[in-house]
Amino acid sequence: MNSSVQNNINDILTGIKDICIKQGRDYNDVTLVAVSKTVEVEKIKEVADAGIENVGENKVQEILEKYDELKDVLNIHMIGHLQRNKVKYIIDKVALIHSVDSIRLLKEINRRAAQLELIVDVLIQVNVADEETKYGIKIDEVNSFLKNSAGFDNVSIKGLMTIAPFTDNKEDVRQVFRALKKKFDEISALSYCNVEMKYLSMGMTGDYPIALEEGANMLRIGTKIFGSRTYNK
Ligand SMILES: *Cc1c(COP(=O)(O)O)cnc(C)c1O
């Protein structure tokens, strides 16, 4: 039986394949993270049935509520703003933290990871367009941030993440993705301690084809998989 979730995922994967073929890229290098915030566990499990391995959540509380039921079938990614005092709750439950936006947060992740003898994979969130409403470090500060991360041996920085501005101007969105890809490539050519530029996490329901065209290899898609979110509260 085909669920709508499965159909939506198939549509997305077909689109990803088409773009990769056009660009001569290997489609298998692209990771789709199904963003499951506000979605019930039973429905989230449908993505696993459709062959997806990764889901993204943006709230610590929600990860804790869903963890026991999801942990055996899906890797959970933390994609939302993370407060330092909540690191301890999820540090051993998430596969990747996309939203490291300060050295203080990185330091706390490192400290908690060391206590549990873990190496935790993280991405640095970059506020490319320097929007006041968004978290993330400035693109000009990425290199110094990575330099300052050198002593944190219980974190492994695996790449960069951004959220594009909410605008209908596709060209503006494209420029943001292009700028981050350029930074990603620049850093890839340098060698910082505990840093490996493996994942470029950018692109959501409204802009993922553009992100992919500009070099994203990790897409975070919610609405197009699960439908519109309903927030109670
Ligand atoms: C909600 C969310 C997404 C997915 O957004 P959609 O538009 O529903 O695809 C991606 N990234 C982050 C950080 C989010 O919070």
Image (cartoon, grey):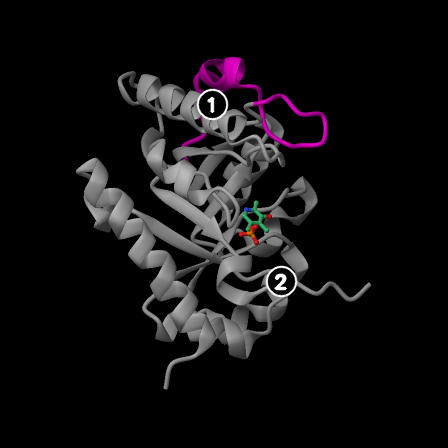
For the residue marked with disc 1, what is the amino acid? Gln
Q: Position of residue 120 (x, y in %)?
A: 43, 44
Residue identified by numbered label 1? 175
Q: What's the magenta region?
A: 129-156
Residue identified by numbered label 2? 228
Classify the position of the N terminus by image quarter: bottom left
Q: How many labels does the image show?
A: 2
Q: Position of residue 114 (x, y in %)?
A: 47, 42
Q: Where is residue 233 in the image (x, y as percent from the top left)?
A: 82, 63
Q: Position of residue 126 (x, y in %)?
A: 53, 28
In the displayed structure, 82 sits above or below 8; it is above
**Is mark 2 in CB contact (under 8 Å) with mark 1?**
no
Q: Foreground residue, 169 or 139? A: 169
Q: How crowded is mark 1: few (under 14 residues within 10 Å), some or many (20 or more)?
A: some
Q: Is residue 127 left or right of residue 210?
A: right
Residue at image x 36%, y 62%? 11
Q: Is there any visible trace of residue 190 in the rendered image?
A: yes
CB at disc 1 and ligand 1 closer than 8 Å:
no
For the residue marked with disc 2, what is the amino acid? Ser
Q: Residues within 10 Å of mark 2 (few under 14, many from 20)?
A: few
In the displayed structure, 58 sits above or below 134; it is below
Residue at image x 29%, y 18%? 191
- Element under label 2? loop
Q: Foreground residue, 90 or 168? A: 168
Q: Is residue 230 left or right of residue 153?
A: right
In the rendered image, residue 141 lying in the magenta stretch gets the answer yes
Of all residues, the one furthest to the right in this rendering is 233
In the rendered image, residue 114 lying in the magenta stretch gets the answer no
Identify the image quadrant of residue 151: top left
- Element under label 1? helix
